[in-house]
C-alpha cells in the first residue's frame, strides 16, 4: 500500500500567475492558468474531523481553491459541505470495497489529496496507489487504542498509512511523535480548533435544564460516540457514587453508538441518575447549561467537548490522556483514566466549590484564546499545500 511520492505533478514554472485576490492558481503544461484542485477525504466522520473539513472547505473555497469532499452522504446533511462551496462525492461505508474505486475516480485530476483520520487515510492511500505524483496529506485527528489482535492490525494500518503520506499533520504532539515512530517521512504539529459559531448561542434561562430535568439539581454533561474507549463504564461507576449527594446531580450523555443498549440496561438496573439523549444538534447549548463537563475517555487529542467547555467557560473534569493536557493546560481538573473514585471526587469537589468553578471558567476562556483561529488553521494548511504543489 506504500505510495511513492515524487515532485508535484505539473509544478508551476515561474510561480503563481494573477488569478484574483487570494486565488490559488497554477500554470499547466500548456501555459494555461488553473485553480488549485484539492480532494478532502473523510472516513467515519468524527465530530471534530467533520467540523474541521467543513471549516477548511469554506476557507479554501473563499481563497479560490476548488474543493471536492469525499464523505458518507449523511455527513453532508449535518455539515453542509456543498453549502461551504465544495463539491460532494458520496462514499459508501468504509467496509465497502467499492469506496476505494469511487475515491480513485474522484481523485483524477486533483493537485493534492487530503485525508482526515486513519480510516480516510487508508482509503486514500489505496486510491492513490496508481498516482505516485499526487501529493497526499493526512491529518491524524485522534486514535482508538486497541488490545490483542486488533492492536497488531492497528499498528500495521498506522504504519502503512503514515508512510504513504507525503506529510502527516498531527493534531497533538503525541500523534506527531507516533507518526514519526511509525515511519512517517514528514510529520508536523497542526492543532485544529472547533469552529466558533457564526451566530450567538440560543441560550434561554433554564430552558435546557428544564428540558433535561435539572432545574433544582446540578447538571453534568458528557458527549461523544457511545463506543469502546470512551470511558462510559467508569463514568457510570462514578454516577453511582453521586446518588449519595443531596441533591444528586443529573448526568446527561449526548451521542450515539453501539454501546447504547448496554449503557441503557445498566442505567435502568442500577437506577443511576443518568440520561442518554442521543445525538444533539444543540450540543453547545447543552454544555453551556451544565455546571460541569466530564470527559472520561481512554484517549483524546482535541476533543470537541473539551474545546466547547473551555470556550464557553464551563468547568471541565477530564482524563489526563493523549493530547488533553496539552489542550487544556491548567484550565481543567485532570484525573487518571479508569479511576472512578478520582473522577467522582473531582466532580464532587467542583460542585461543592463555586469559587473553584469560577476560577476554572475564567482560566478556560483564557486557554481557549490561545488556540488557533479558523482563519489561521486554513492559512497553515494552505501553506502546506503551496509547499507540496510547488507554488
Image (cartoon, rainbow, N blue to C red):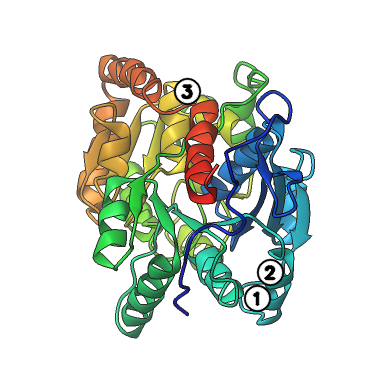
Q: Which residue matches tag 2?
A: 103
- The correct choice, above or below, for 157 with respect to 47 in the image is below
Q: Position of residue 133 (x, y in %)?
A: 55, 65
Horizontally, residue 344 falls left or right of residue 135, namely left
In the image, 378 versus 304, the foreground residue is 378
Residue 258 location (% of width, % of height): 55, 68
> Which is nearer the N-term, disc 1 or disc 3?
1
Q: CA distance from mark 1 to mark 3?
A: 40 Å
Check disc 1 and report the residue beneath it. 100
- Distance from Cα at disc 1 to Cα at disc 2: 5 Å
Q: Nearer the viewer, residue 25 or 287?
A: 25
Tell me whether circle 1 and circle 2 mark residues in contact (CB < 8 Å): yes
Numbered disc in front, either 3 or 2: 2
Label 1: which secondary element: helix
| Nearest to the observer: residue 340 or residue 244 | 340
Write the residue at 68% across / 59% down: 71
On residue 75, the disc is none
Q: Quadrant of residue 316?
A: top left
Q: Is residue 390 left or right of residue 334?
A: right
Coordinates of residue 94 in the picture (x, y in percent): 61, 73
- Viewer can see residue 253: no
Q: Is residue 23 visible?
A: yes
Q: CA distance from mark 3 to mark 2?
A: 38 Å
Amino acid at each position: 500500500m506504500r505510495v511513492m511520492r515524487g515532485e508535484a505533478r505539473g509544478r508551476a514554472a515561474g510561480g503563481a500567475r494573477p488569478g484574483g485576490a487570494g486565488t490559488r492558481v497554477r500554470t499547466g503544461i500548456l501555459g494555461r492558468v488553473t485553480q488549485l484542485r484539492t480532494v478532502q477525504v473523510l472516513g467515519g466522520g468524527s465530530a471534530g474531523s467533520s467540523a474541521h473539513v467543513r471549516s477548511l472547505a469554506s476557507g479554501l473555497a473563499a481563497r479560490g481553491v476548488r474543493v471536492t469532499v469525499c464523505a458518507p452522504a449523511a455527513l453532508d446533511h449535518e455539515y453542509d459541505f456543498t453549502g461551504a462551496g465544495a463539491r460532494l462525492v458520496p462514499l459508501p461505508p468504509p467496509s465497502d470495497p467499492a469506496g476505494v474505486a469511487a475515491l480513485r475516480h474522484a481523485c483524477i485530476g486533483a493537485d493534492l489529496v487530503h485525508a482526515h483520520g486513519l480510516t480516510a487515510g487508508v482509503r486514500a492511500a489505496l486510491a492513490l496507489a496508481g498516482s505516485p505524483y499526487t501529493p497526499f496529506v493526512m491529518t491524524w485527528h485522534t486514535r482508538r487504542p486497541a488490545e490483542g489482535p486488533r492492536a497488531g492490525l492497528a499498528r500495521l494500518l498506522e504504519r502503512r498509512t503514515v508512510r504513504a503520506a507525503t506529510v502527516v499533520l498531527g493534531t497533538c504532539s503525541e500523534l506527531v511523535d507516533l507518526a514519526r515512530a511509525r515511519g512517517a517521512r514528514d510529520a508536523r504539529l497542526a492543532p485544529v480548533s472547533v469552529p466558533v459559531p457564526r451566530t450567538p448561542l440560543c441560550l434561554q434561562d433554564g430552558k435546557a435544564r428544564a428540558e433535561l430535568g435539572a432545574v433544582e439539581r446540578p447538571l453534568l454533561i458528557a458527549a461523544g460516540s457511545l463506543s469502546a474507549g470512551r470511558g462510559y463504564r467508569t463514568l457510570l461507576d462514578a454516577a453511582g457514587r453521586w446518588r449519595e449527594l443531596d441533591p444528586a446531580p443529573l448526568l446527561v450523555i449526548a451521542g450515539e453508538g453501539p454501546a447504547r443498549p448496554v449503557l441503557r440496561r445498566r442505567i435502568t438496573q442500577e437506577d443511576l441518575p443518568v440520561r442518554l439523549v442521543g445525538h444533539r444538534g444543540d450540543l453547545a447549548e447543552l454544555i453551556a447549561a451544565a455546571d460541569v463537563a466530564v470527559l472520561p475517555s481512554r484517549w483524546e487529542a482535541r476533543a470537541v467537548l473539551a474545546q466547547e467547555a473551555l470556550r464557553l467557560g464551563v468547568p471541565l473534569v477530564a482524563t489526563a490522556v493523549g493530547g488533553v493536557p496539552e489542550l487544556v493546560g491548567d484550565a481543567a481538573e485532570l484525573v487518571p483514566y479508569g479511576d472512578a473514585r478520582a473522577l467522582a471526587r473531582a466532580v464532587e469537589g467542583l460542585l461543592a466549590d463555586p469559587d473553584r468553578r469560577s476560577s476554572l471558567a475564567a482560566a478556560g476562556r483564557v486557554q481557549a484564546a490561545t488556540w488557533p483561529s479558523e482563519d489561521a488553521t486554513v492559512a497553515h494548511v494552505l501553506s502546506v499545500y503551496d509547499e507540496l504543489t510547488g507554488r
